[in-house]
Amino acid sequence: METNGYPQNEHEDIDLSQFDDDYESAEVEDREFEPVPDGKYQVKVDRVEIARAKSSGNPMLKWTLKILAPTHAGRLLWRNNVMASKENVKWLKNDLHVCGLELEKLSELPERLDDLLDLTLEVTKRTRGENENIYLNRRIEIDAGDSDGEPARDAKGEIIPF
């Protein structure tokens, strides 16, 4: 039997009682974050996974994107590519192309997920009503060894405006 996706007995050998006193005396910090405002952000692909949409059961690619700049650094954005129609698959293929990941077949994606990790992207967050959408605009190539004060440049060599 599974609980929260984990086998029920998997953590029986872990004794948390040693932390009971610390837990009891720890103060709770109330944290309320305002939503990240609409706009363009530089992000790093923090996590990608293939999962099933809870409501429909359709397969989807779930993205976790960590904001680097220009504001809200460290905050997370999420994008889901649900695969339920030709149009959905077209959007996914375009997102993968933006990331520089070219596949012959979509069935190759599970083995290539690691190729998406740690990519730097420019994204746009747009809210319409209660729906938040994240659009992948372009991949950004940042030379990690370049610390001479020169501005970061994208894959085309253009200066990144942040």
Image (tube, rainbow, N blue to C red):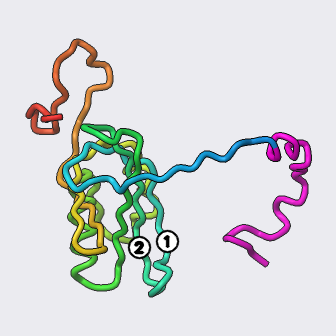
Real-space Cα separation, disc 1 to disc 2, in angstroms: 5 Å
Quadrant position of residue 92 = bottom left
Viewer-proximal residue, 18 or 52? Answer: 18
Determine which residue is flagged by label 2: 60
So how many labels did they put on this image?
2
In the image, the segment drawn in magenta is 1-24
Residue 142 screen position, x and y as percent: 25, 31
Determine which residue is flagged by label 1: 51
Kindly identify the residue that appears in the image at 82 percent across and 62 percent down. 10
From the viewer's perspective, tell me whether residue 101 is left or right of residue 59: left
Q: Going from the N terminus, do you reach mark 1 or mark 2 first?
A: 1
Quadrant position of residue 103 = bottom left
85 shown above or below 27: below
Is mark 1 in CB contact (under 8 Å) with mark 2?
A: yes
Q: Which residue type carries mark 1? A: Ala
Q: Residues within 10 Å of mark 2 (few under 14, many from 20)?
A: many
Residue at disc 1, secondary structure: strand
Which mark is drawn over residue 39? Answer: none
Q: On the rendered image, what quadrant is the N terminus found in?
A: bottom right
Q: Residues within 10 Å of mark 1 (few under 14, many from 20)?
A: some
96 shown above or below 91: above
Kindly identify the residue that appears in the image at 24 percent across and 66 percent down. 127
Q: On the rendered image, what quadrant is the C terminus found in?
A: top left
Q: Which residue type carries mark 2? A: Met
From the viewer's perspective, tell me whether residue 74 is left or right of residue 91: right
* Magenta region includes residue 3: yes
Viewer-proximal residue, 86 or 127? Answer: 127
Quadrant position of residue 85 = bottom left
72 shown above or below 142: below
Residue 70 screen position, x and y as percent: 24, 37
Kindly identify the residue that appears in the image at 16 percent across and 24 percent down. 151
Residue 43 screen position, x and y as percent: 31, 45
